[in-house]
Each structure stands twice: as C-alpha cells, then as structure tokens.
Amino acid sequence: MLIAKEEEMQKTYYNPQEVARMLGISKQTLLRYERKRIFPRPKRNPINKRREYTVVDIQRLKQIAGRA
C-alpha cells in the first residue's frame, strides 16, 4: 500500500476520485465542497474540461480538511 501512495504522488495531475481517496472522503463530498466554496475549484483540462488537481492543490485541500 505504501508503494501505491508513493506512485500516486509521482503523477502531475489527479482526478477527483483519486483526490477524494487521498482525503478520505467520497467524490460526491469533494464536489459538494467545491460547489459550496469550502474547497477552491481546481483547474480544468483545456481539451476535455475535466478537473485536474496538482500535488499543491491536494496539500491545500488536506490543510482545509484538517488532514495535513
């Protein structure tokens, strides 16, 4: 399991499902927090408009969620 976490942190961008798993919340909760502006909205991929989270974004979300 530790190897999987290290491999995840090697990526440049993460999708909402991966970020929710890292935060210990559901994807629906992540998206709800964004809509309510508890969490800042992530950048979107210019081609397919999907949410993309960076390692810095994930660290910020962990601090907001109190999981840092």
Image (cartoon, grey):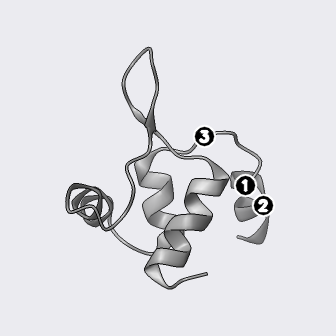
Residue lying at 61% horizontally and 66% vertically, measured from the top left: 59
Number of marks present in the image shown: 3
* Quarter of the image where one finds residue 1: bottom right
Whether residue 32 is situated above or below residue 16 in the rendered picture? below
Left or right: 43 in relation to 32:
right
Residue 41 in percent (x, y) is at 37, 49
Q: Residue at x 57, y 60 (%)?
A: 58
- At 47% from the left and 76% from the top, the residue drawn is 64
- CB under 8 Å between callouts 3 and 2? no
Quadrant holding the C terminus: bottom right
Residue type at mark 1 is Met
Q: Are marks 2 and 1 in contact (CB under 8 Å)?
A: yes
Q: Residue at x 39, y 56 (%)?
A: 40
Residue holding disc 2: 6
Q: Nearer the viewer, residue 59 or 2?
A: 59
Label 1 crowd (10 A; few <14 / some 14-19 / many >=20): few
Task: Classify residue 2 as left or right of residue 30.
Answer: right
Closest to the observer, 2 or 55: 55
Secondary structure beneath dot 2 equals: helix
Q: Earlier in the sequence, mark 3 or mark 2?
A: 2
Q: What's under tag 2, amino acid-wise?
A: Glu
Tag 3 residue: 13
